[in-house]
Amino acid sequence: GAYGAAAGNGNMKRIHHFRLGGSIDMLTGPLLKKLLLFSLPLMVSSVLQLLFNAADVVVVGRYASYASLAAVGSTTAIVNLVVNLLIGMAVGVNVVVARYIGEGDKSREISAAIHTAVAMALVGGLILGGVGCAMAEWILRMISTPEDIFDLALTYLYIYFAGTPAIMLYNYGAAALRARGDTQRPLLFLTISGVTNVALNLLFVISFQMDVAGVALATVISETLSAVLVVVCLMRTQDELHFSWRKLRFDRRSLGLMAKVGIPAGVQGCLFSVANVVIQGAINAYGSVVVAGCSAAGSIDGFIYVAMNTFHQSAQTFLSQNIGAGKYERVKEILKKCILCTVVTGATLSAVACIWSEPLLAIYNQDPAVLAAGAVRLRMVVIPYVIFGVADVLTGAIRGCGSPMRPVVINLLCTCVFRLAWIAAIDTDTMAPTWVYASYPASWLLLLVVLLVCWCRLYRRKIKPNIARNGAAA
C-alpha cells in the first residue's frame, strides 16, 4: 500500500488509543454511534464555517446593494480555484496521521507529520496568496465579470488572498486533530472565529461603510484568529500531536506521503473549481441580477454540500485508521453507514431548501428579480444533490483505501471535461440559465456511476483478499 504494510495476519501490533480531546476509538465496537460522534461535531463545524462565510454575502446583500452581493458571490469559484490545491493537502495530513494512529507505535512519524504540515501551511499559503493576488484581475476578465461589479470583486479578492496562510494553517491543524477523532476543539475554535467574523462584518459594513472591503477584512481577521487557536492547541497538547516552533521543518518522508494523497485531492478540488469558473463565466453573461441570485442560491446549497461532505471525511478517516490497523473486515460496514447517513442528511436538507426556497433567499436580498433568479438555480441543484453526496463518500472511501489518483482521473473526465463540453455547447444569447445549471446534476450522475465501478474493482482486488488472509490467519 501507499503507507507500507499494515499490521495484520495474526501479528497485529497493539493499537494505542488517544484519550485527550474527545478522541474516538475507530477500530473496535459498533460503527454507527462512533461515526455520528465523529461526524456531528464536524458537520456543525462545517455548517458554522459556511454560516459565518455566508454572513459576508448576507451583510453586503442587505446593507450594501445587490451589486455588492454579486461581487462577493462571483469570487467564490475563483477563491476555490486558487486555494483548493493546498486545502487538498489537509486531506493528506488527515489520512497520513490517521494511518499512523491505526498502525500504532508511530509517535516520531506523527510528530514529523505535524511539523511538516505547519511549515507547508505557512510557506504554501504565502506563495499561493501572492499568486492569487497576481492573477485576480486576469481571471475576473477571463470570466467576463460584469463591469458594474468588477472593481468590488477585485477588492474582495486582494484582501482575501492576504489571509491565505491563516486559512491553510487552520485547515491543516484541524485535519490533524480530526485524524484521531477530535472534532470538538476545531468546532470550538471555528465558533469563536465565526462569531468574530459576524461582529466585524456588521461593524465594518454598517458602522464604517466599508462595503465589500469590510467583509473581506473581517474574513481575514477571523481566519487568523482560528489559525492562532489551533496552533496554541497543538502547542499545549502533550502527546504525539504536540507542536513546537523549534521543531518546525519539512520532513521529506512526511511531505512525500502527504503529497501522495493531498496533491491528488487538491487537484481534484481544482478540477471542480476550473469547471465552476467556466460555469460562472456563463452565468455572468446573463447580467448582475442573475449573478446575485446565483450567489444567494449557491450559499444556501453550500450548507447541504458541507453537511453531506461530513460523511466523506468520516469514511476517509475511519477507513484510513482501520486499514492501517489491518481491520479490512470493517471496510464495507463503514462505507454502508456513511452512505446511509449521507442519503438521509442530503434528502432532508434538500427538501427543506426546496419548500422554503424564497424565504431562505430573502435572507440575502429582497429584490424580486434576484429572488426569482435564485429560486430557479436552487431547485435545479438541490433536488438531485444527494447523488453528488453519495459520489463524494465513494471518493473519500477510495482515497482512504490508499488509492488517491483514481478519484482525480475520474473527476477530470466526469466533472471537468464533461462540464466544459456542456458549457461550450450552450449559447447564452438564446438559451436560458437553466441549461447552465443542468450541467451540475448531469455530471454528478455520470460521476456516481463511474465511481461505483471503481470502488467495486478496488474492493474486489484489495480489500477482499486481505479479509480472506486475516480470516485464514485467525
Image (spheres, grey):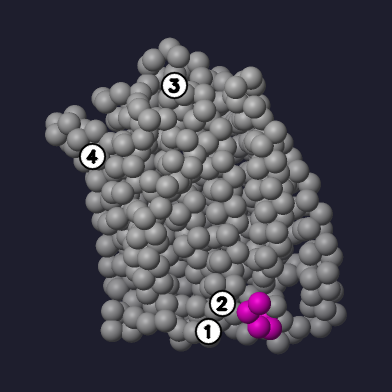
Residue type highlighted by circle 4: Gly
Looking at this view, is 38 or 58 the one in front?
Answer: 58
Residue type highlighted by circle 2: Leu
> Vertically, is 358 above or below 453?
above
Which numbered marker is on residue 304?
A: none
Residue linked to disc 2 = 257
Residue linked to disc 3 = 289
Task: Give the number of the mark in front: 1 or 4.
Answer: 4
Taking the image as shown, residue 58 lies to the left or right of residue 328, namely left
Magenta stretch, residue numbers: 2-7
Q: Quadrant of residue 168?
A: bottom left
Looking at this view, is 176 or 165 the one in front?
Answer: 165
Q: In whole angstroms, how far apart are the C-alphas of marks 4 and 3?
A: 22 Å
The location of residue 298, given as percent across then percent down, is 49, 33
Q: In whole angstroms, how far apart are the C-alphas of marks 2 and 3?
A: 46 Å
The location of residue 278, given as percent across then percent down, is 56, 41
Residue linked to disc 1 = 253
Task: Give the number of the mark in front: 4 or 3.
Answer: 3
> Vertically, is 155 above or below 107?
above
Query: Which secondary structure, mark 4?
Result: helix
Q: In whole angstroms, how far apart are the C-alphas of marks 1 and 4?
A: 42 Å
Furthest residue to the left?
208
Residue 436 seen in the current view: yes
Furthest residue to the top?
368
Q: Please tell me which of labels 4 and 2 falls first in the chain.
A: 4
Residue sitting at x 50%, y 80% = 254
Q: In whole angstroms, how far apart are the C-alphas of marks 4 and 2?
A: 39 Å
